[in-house]
Image (cartoon, grey):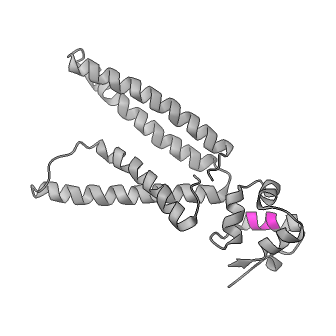
Amino acid sequence: MIVHTSAKKRYNRRVIALSLIYSVLLIGAVYLFKHHMVSGPMAWIVGVLPALLIIAIFAAIGAYIVEETDEYLRMLLIRRTLYASAITLSITTVWGFLESFGLVGHIAAYYTSVLWFIGLGAGTVINRVTEGTWSS
Amino acid sequence: MNNRLKVLRAERNWSQADLAERLEVSRQSINAIETGKYDPSLPLAFRIARLFELPIETIFFAD
């Protein structure tokens, strides 16, 4: 059973809103760059905007950790972030060495964030296996 | 750490959800504490003791 505390509801609302804004900004940025409509300082601003929204989602997760008053659910969430970090750091470290030795191709750095979010999902499954709950 | 939470709850005919509501925590928290998967913080342990009107050491004890 998934528990929705008030902190979790606020977190869900924030992440949905940020994800929608991110989608709009990413589509807009891709369009502008594809059609060579931005250059100079504006190109930097347009290029970094989608990344800022991903950072905002990280901040939303941090806010959820701070705002969750149920200590057990907070512990489960912190475990998920630790699993995500461990998985991401391990895979990117291994990939970095393999790439340096010319054994694998280059991957864009933003895939680190993608990997971390996948790790967050893996953390949910690990929590289910070890703690018997899907919560947080 | 072991505890008598399940016994104390049963004596009062409270469900896990009832106890969770009284302590303002999730039912998952109660289940995790009862099954020994999670040891509550000192503030939560004191809240539990206050709710059952018992000394904390009669609810929680070392293995």
Give the side of residue B16 with respect to residue A86, left or right.
Answer: right
Characterize the magenta stretch by its predominant secondary structure.
Answer: helix
Q: In this view of the protein, which residue sits in the foreground, A91 or A3?
A: A3
Picture quadrant of residue B13: bottom right
Above or below, B25 relative to B13 = above
The location of residue B26, given as percent across then percent down, is 70, 55
Where, quadrant-wise, is the C terminus of chain B in this rendering?
A: bottom right
Residue B40 can be seen, yes or no: no
Where, quadrant-wise, is the N terminus of chain B in this rendering?
A: bottom right
Q: In this view of the protein, which residue sits in the foreground, B7 or A48?
A: B7
For image coordinates 33% across by 30% down, the residue present is A48
Picture quadrant of residue B35: bottom right
Residue A37 can be seen, yes or no: yes
Give the side of residue A110 with respect to residue A6, left or right.
Answer: left
The location of residue A127, given as percent across then percent down, is 52, 61
For image coordinates 81% across by 61% down, the residue present is B15
The location of residue A130, given as percent across then percent down, is 53, 67
For image coordinates 71% across by 70% down, the residue present is B34
Which range of residues does the magenta coloring cover? B44-48
Query: Magenta span has A22?
Result: no
Above or below, A35 relative to A73 = above
